[in-house]
Each structure stands twice: as C-alpha cells, then as structure tokens.
Amino acid sequence: MSEKQLSAVEAELYDRQIRLWGIESQERLRAANILLIGIRGLGSEIAKNILLSGINSLVVLDDGIVTEEEQLKNFLLSKDSIGKKIAEEVLLKAQALNPLVKISADTSSPTSKDGTFFEDFTIIIATGLKTDFLLKIDKICRSKKIKFIAGDVFGTFGFSVADFLNHEYFEDQVKLIAKKRAHDGTETKPEKETVKVKSEIIYPELNKVIILPNTKQSVEHIKKVKRRNEYFFLMLTLLEFRDRQERNPDISNKEKDIKVLQEIKSEILDLYGIDQEKLDDGLLELVFGEIVPVCAVLGGVIAQEVIKAVSLKEAPINNVFLFDPLTYSGKEETVG
C-alpha cells in the first residue's frame, strides 16, 4: 500500500487525528481500501468509526434484506429501508459521515465471491460468517499479504479475532536526554525527547486459533495455556452453533437453542480437556440477539484495531478480544 499525500481539505478535516497519531499514519489511512462483510448492528458501528478515521474507500458486502428488527438496531437505516437491500440502504447515511471517503455497496452473497475479489483490499473485516468461510478468507488474505479481522456480537457477549500477519508498528516512547555540564561547572536539567520505537507481532493464521470439533487441527498448542479465559470457549461454542444451525441463537427458539448450545459447549470443553464447570450454563442465557450498546463498544474496538493495523501506530491486540457479558469489560487473549 503506497501512502497518499493529504490535500489541504483533508489536512484540515483530520487535524485532530493528525495531532494524535501523526501525518504519516493519517496518510497510510488515507490510502487504505477496506472491505466490510456484514453491515448489521455490529457492522454499522465498525463502518461509522473507520469512515470517520479518514480511509480512502469502503466496500460494503451484504446480501441481506432490511427487516423491521434490523432497522431498529442499525442507525444507518430508516423505516423506509424495510424490504430493501441492506448494503444499498446504508450508503446515504454512511456517506454523510465522511463525504471524502469513496463508499460502494455489493449486494451479492459473500460466499459467491472467488479469491480474486478479495485481492485489492488493504484490510478485510468480517462479521456474521460461518467458520469455514472465515478460514477460507484468512487463507486468501495470507497469500496476498492482506490483514484480516473478524468479530461478532451475541447478546451481551462479543469477540474479535485478528490475523495481521507479521505486523510491524511504531510506538512513541519518552526518552530522557542526559544532563550536560557547562564550562562553569553547572549542569543543565535533563530534557525529554519523544522517539519512535519499532516493534513486531507475529500473528498465527486463524485455523490455529479457531479449532472446533470434527476438525483435523490439533489443539495441543492451545491447551498448553492452563488458565485460558472461559469466554474463549463461549466464542467457539457460538461459532459452532452457527455452523451447525446456519443461524445465530434465536430468542423465539430459546429453550431448544440453549439445549443445543449446552451440547456443543460440552463437546468443545471435552476437545480442549477443560472441566465442564469452567463455562457456566447460565452464560448461555445471555447470547441472544445483537444488543445495540454491545455493538457500539465492540464496533469501536474492532475499528480501533483496524486503524492500528493500517496506520502502524501503537500495538494492536494480539490476537483475540473477548467482551465479558457480565462485567462489560474487555479481555485480551493471545491464542495460537
């Protein structure tokens, strides 16, 4: 990705951001072409934040139709949007957030796309996808050196998983300049200097992070961590539920869905050699629907990770973020 020099209008619009993370980082953002798969409750929050950051272009890929329920939890939609293509209906309000960003909609099914479709993006964000397709996209991204992040909201629980490849980034660190002695013997006070320090995080591919029952991947490298966060296993349980049921848990089918979730949870914990008490069944009561405030929080987190990944400014999460459905706090896990 080549950096794009900012125009005078852009420099003025993004002045506060440039003061925060510097002109070089803003120019990297301004050159970024981003694909967002899924523009539902969570996707709309992600879109808002990355549009405001000042990227070059955003393609929204979603083949869904706006329902009354969807319209109520997506601030980019209006009542007039019901029954229409969601990817097209979000464009008007999305564009208004930042007229300088090129935004386009693709209403075809994500799974209908071949590998070449994904090749021209700087980073890809995915929501609402089944696991096999997530892993397929990650494989394509790795072959083309494209960064990838996926996330979802289930009730008051949410998560994100990132594969930023071999990610180099810069952090500002304050360095003290040594005292200097003058000719008269007096010493000057030490001065502070801000310097950029380069670091690197090597991310594992997603098939070493998301390992579900009936796959051929070994889980031994994950089992080595004795105190793995219990919400990591909740994430896997929900992904496996979506894979099997081809939908998310539905409040109208709550009792049956909880039984299925309990069965899957048991399989997941057995696979990883974890005591069944590690993941309380009571948590399964909290995973229904897309709760708007949780979408807002997680959407902000994912967008911030996208900004870090593109701008090369500050350390991103390595590599799993889990939103606690009980305390509403975030937890970072290094998996794989």
Image: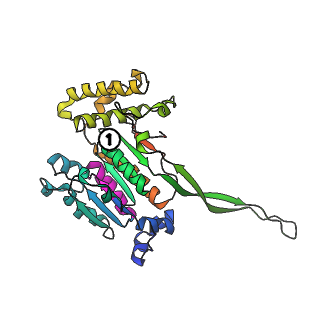
Q: Give the quarter of the figure containing the N terminus.
A: bottom left
Q: Residue at x 20, y 60 (%)?
A: 88
What's the magenta region?
35-53
Residue 300 is left or right of residue 318, and the answer is: left
Q: Eyeballing the image, is 161 above or below 311?
A: above
Main SS, magenta region, reads helix
Q: Amino acid at mark 1?
A: Thr
Q: Could you tell me residue 3's position as x and y percent? A: 46, 69
- Give yes or no for residue 42 being in the magenta stretch: yes
Number of numbered discs: 1
- Could you tell whether 90 is left or right of 170 in the image? left
- Circle 1 SS class: helix
Which residue is identified by label 1?
131
Does the segment drawn in magenta span residue 28? no
Q: Does residue 114 show up? A: yes
**In the image, residue 66 lies at what x, y percent?**
16, 51
Query: Is residue 222 placed above or below 38 in the rendered structure?
Result: above
- Residue under the image location 28 percent in, 28 percent down: 261
Using the image as rendered, state which of residue 144 and residue 149 is in the foreground: 144
Tell me if residue 4 comes above or below residue 279 in the rendering: below
Residue 24: x and y, percent? 50, 68
The answer to which image quadrant residue 303 occupies is bottom left
The reply, left or right, for residue 287 in relation to residue 30 is left
x%, y% of residue 298? 36, 47
Quadrant in which residue 108 is drawn: bottom left
For label 1, the crowd category at 10 Å Cα-Cα, with few meaning under 14, some 14 to 19 and many 20 or more, is: some
Q: Is residue 300 visible?
A: no
Residue 15 vs 241, above or below: the answer is: below
